[in-house]
Image (spheres, helix red, strand yellow):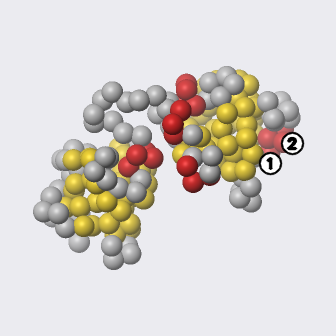
Amino acid sequence: MAALDLVLVGRVAKAHGITGELAVDVRTDSPEVRFAIDATVTARLRDGSEQPLTVAAARQHAGRLLLRFTQVPDRTVAEGLRGALLLADPAALPPIDDPDEFYDHELAGLSAVLVDGTRVGTVRDITHGPAGDTLVIDRVDGDELLVPFVRAIVPEVDVRGGRVVLDPPEGLIE
């Protein structure tokens, strides 16, 4: 599978302990699937190289997921993975039954348009923060636009049609 087909599911924050455990910031709504025992992810290292990793153990600790991979036998190897992005195949995700729920990778690349059809730009990413989710949109003029991902502002998401409809309050996109 090409790296472009992979989706971000986590980021290695640091090594934990001396046995090769890694503290991971999770970036998936399905950590129990993505980081199940024997699941495989691809680590994209800071130098751009990639390496497959197989989950050997997983547990929660202090707001992060602690993972052991069969390819990481000790802290020295674990330190080399600091900052690595953990990527996975989106086809392995379970389907979502709720029509108002989406995987991040489904939103990236969608065209962002106003309710009158005016094209604003393209969704580049979605960020998840304590105050809620935000769409990161690359505007047609080259600037970046941050849009709160709430129904009042994003009343329609049409993944199959390739677009999100925006109904922003005055001043949000000017």
Q: In the image shown, does 82 or 158 lie closer to the viewer?
A: 158
Q: CA distance from mark 1 to mark 2?
A: 7 Å
Which residue lies under the disc numbered 1? 80
- What x and y, as percent, mark residue 154? 23, 50
Foreground residue, 140 or 158? Answer: 158
- Disc 1 + disc 2, Cβ < 8 Å: yes
Residue 15 position in % (x across, y down): 75, 40
Residue drawn at x 30%, y 29% is 98
Extreme residue in the bottom direction: 141
In this rendering, the answer to whether 99 lies above or below 127 is above
Q: Is residue 129 left or right of residue 78?
A: left
- Element marked by disc 2: helix
Q: Where 22 sits versus 47, above or below?
A: above
Image position of 162 with respect to 13: above or below: below
The residue indicated by pointer 2 is 76
- Which SS class for mark 1? loop
* Mark 2 crowdedness (10 Å alpha carbons): few <14, some 14-19, many ≥20: few
Instruction: Find residue 50 and report its horizontal and vertical position in percent.
Output: 72, 50
Is residue 4 visible in this depiction of the protein?
yes
Name the kind of residue labelled 1 in the image.
Answer: Gly
